[in-house]
Image (cartoon, rainbow, N blue to C red):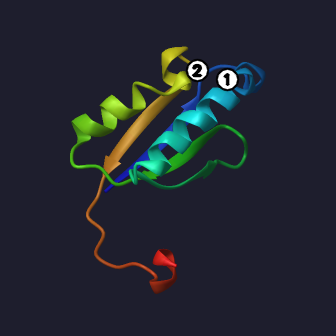
Amino acid sequence: MFLIMLQYIRPVAAVEHYMEAHTAFLQKYYDSGRFILSGRRKPKSGSVILCNASSRKEVEEIMSEDPLEKYQLALYEIIEFEPTKYASTLGK
C-alpha cells in the first residue's frame, strides 16, 4: 500500500487549469482498483492519494501519467506502508 503526497509547486491557478485532466487520470485508476481514496490538502497546497499497487515502480509509472506531473505542477512523495489495522467501515 502506498500513500502519495502531492505538493503543488506552481500557483493554484496553473494547477486548476489541468484539474479536469487530473480528475480523469484519478478516475482511470479508481476504475482499475488502484486508487482507494484521494483528496485535497488543507490549505489547498496539494493532495493525497491512497494507492494499492504491487510495487513502488508501479506507483511511479502510474503517477507519470498524471497531468500535474507531465506539466511539472507538483512534486510527489511516495510512502510505502503495510496496513496492519483498518476501520471495518472502510470496505463499505
Tag 2's secondary structure? Answer: loop
Callout 2 crowding tier (Cα within 10 Å): few <14, some 14–19, many ≥20: some
Give the label, 1 or 2, closer to the camera: 1
Q: Is disc 1 in contact with disc 2, using a CB cutoff of under 8 Å?
A: yes
Q: Compared to 91, does 3 lie above or below?
A: above
Q: Classify residue 77 by image quadrant.
A: top left
Which sits in the foreground, 74 or 51? 51
Q: Is residue 54 left or right of residue 47?
A: left
Residue type at numbered disc 2: Leu
Residue pushed farthest right? 13
Residue 82: x, y in percent? 26, 64
Which sits in the foreground, 90 or 78? 90
Q: Residue at point 73% right, 45% down?
A: 43
Q: Residue at point 43% right, 44% down?
A: 4
Residue 15: x, y in percent? 68, 24
Disc 1 versus disc 2: distance between alpha carbons?
A: 9 Å
* Marks 1 and 2, the one that precedes in the sequence: 1
Q: Residue at point 30% right, 69% down?
A: 83
Callout 1 crowding tier (Cα within 10 Å): few <14, some 14–19, many ≥20: some
Q: Which residue is mark 1?
A: 18
Residue 41: x, y in percent? 64, 48
Q: Which residue is mark 2?
A: 73
* Quarter that holds the N terminus: bottom left
Q: Is residue 76 left or right of residue 53?
A: right
Q: Residue at point 44% right, 33% down?
A: 76
Q: Is residue 42 left or right of residue 63?
A: right
Q: Classify residue 26 by image quadrant.
A: top right
Residue pushed farthest front? 31
